[in-house]
Amino acid sequence: MSVSKKAFWAVVVILISGLAVWVQSQFVEEPTFWLTVLHVLLNAILLTFVVMPFFIVHRRLLLSSKKWLSRWSGVAIEFIFYIQVVIGLYLLLLGDTDGLEASALWLHLNLSLLFISFIVLHLVLVKILSKRAH
């Protein structure tokens, strides 16, 4: 399996674990502790060993690309990714210290859906533009 496919599927696994936490929180007052722990551990492992190495290598390609649409969607993905990490760290480290947890959770969830949408858009654009080049 290619590095890009591994990174894509790692993001999908992280999204599914996050959705599991969110769904559980809709039925129970407090989200299940173990689902949250699983989501955090999956993030720590998959982001560190699969997604970030891909981002680092892919960033060089992104900056040198002459295809502005691919470059734009790649930059958007990167920007959303970093916001997601910051919000995730906020939720993990600070939680509901100032009453912003509900807003942070909704923002984290919606950005996750936007993030995966941009990844799919980026993959489609890269496929279309690479077929045009040949």
Image (cartoon, rainbow, N blue to C red):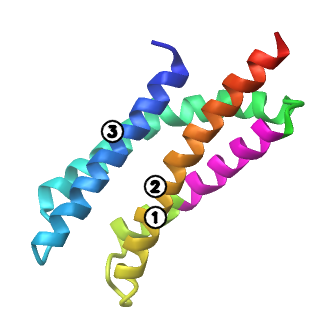
Left or right: 124 in relation to 44:
right
What residue is drawn where x is 82% and y is 36%? 63
Judging depth in this view, the residue of 69 and 61 nearest the camera is 69
Q: Image check: 1 left or right of 13?
A: right
The question of residue 77 being in magenta is answered with yes
x then y, percent, for residue 98: 38, 90
Quadrant position of residue 133: top right
User: What residue is shown with label 1?
Assistant: 110
Circle 2 crowding by C-alpha within 10 Å: few under 14, some 14–19, many from 20: some
Which circle's residue, 3 or 2, is located before the other in the chain? Answer: 3
Circle 2 SS class:
helix
Regarding mark 3 in the picture, which secondary structure is present there? Answer: helix
Residue 127 within the segment the image draws in magenta? no
Q: Secondary structure at mark 1?
A: helix
Q: Report the magenta stretch's main SS.
A: helix
Residue 85 visible from this viewpoint: no
Which residue is depicted at the point 45% across and 24% down?
6
- Which circle, 3 or 2, is nearer the viewer? 2
Quadrant location of the N terminus? top left
Please identify the residue farthest to the right as the structure is shown. Answer: 66
Is label 3 or label 1 in front? 1
**Mark 3 to mark 2: distance in Å?**
13 Å
- The magenta stretch is 69-83
**Against 32, is 57 above or below?**
above
Residue 10 x, y percent position in the rendering: 40, 34
Task: Determine which of the numbered discs, if any, sits on residue 113 in the image.
Answer: 2
Residue underneath mark 3: 13
Amino acid under disc 2: Leu
